[in-house]
Amino acid sequence: MSKKVFVTVGTTKFDKLIETITKDEVLKELSRRGYDHLILQIGASTIDPNCTPRCGMKKVEFFRLKPSIQEYMRSADLVISHAGAGSCLEALEAGRHLIVVTNELLMDNHQLELAEQLGKDNHLYHCTCEDLLETLRVMDLGRLVPLVGDNSEKIARTIDRLMGV
């Protein structure tokens, strides 16, 4: 049975994440963990990722933007996302395993702080592009705690606190 990884950068340009996730060593690690289908949502990027099936990936595809990515989130076995609060919440509320990759060039401190807090609460893993391969190697998805019920209000309060509201 095919296992999907969905990567999203939202509406931003986060070429470094797209370049990192399509490196052979990252693809090999995903394949080692049983994933064989990679879908990339590349936002405002101007690059065309290498979608050649390789390194255990039977299918690699990409798109820039769509009105909704909900179907991709829900069909993924693993979501790898930029640190935007909306993307993080959408993946967690869909019950997906999630790795948040912070963009050190564009991110606001609240994005890192939100990812760190959700990581401390064992809802996700977070890393940088430089740490992604190691995160994939050591992650134990069984230790992640799903968001249960409607935690949006709790998370919204956390975001407000982090932003000083």
Image (cartoon, grey):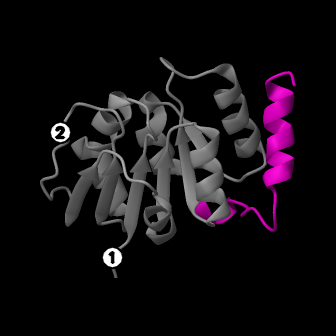
SS at circle 2: loop
Please say whether residue 163 is one of the residues in the magenta stretch.
Answer: yes
Residue receiving disc 1? 2
Residue receiving disc 2? 48
Residue 39 point in image, percent of width and height: 32, 57
Q: Left of 158 or right of it: where is 51?
A: left
Magenta part of the chain: 140-165
Residue most toward the bottom? 1
Q: How far is mark 2 from mark 1, CA to CA?
A: 24 Å
**Neighbourhood count class around disc 1 (C-alpha, 10 Å): few under 14, some 14–19, many 20 upward:** few
SS at circle 1: loop
Is 6 rendered above or below residue 4?
Answer: above
Q: Left of 64 or right of it: where is 6?
A: right
Residue 49 point in image, percent of width and height: 20, 42
Is 18 rendered above or below residue 31?
Answer: above
Q: Residue at x 68, y 61 (%)?
A: 143
Q: Amino acid at mark 1?
A: Ser
Q: Residue at x 47, y 17 (%)?
A: 105
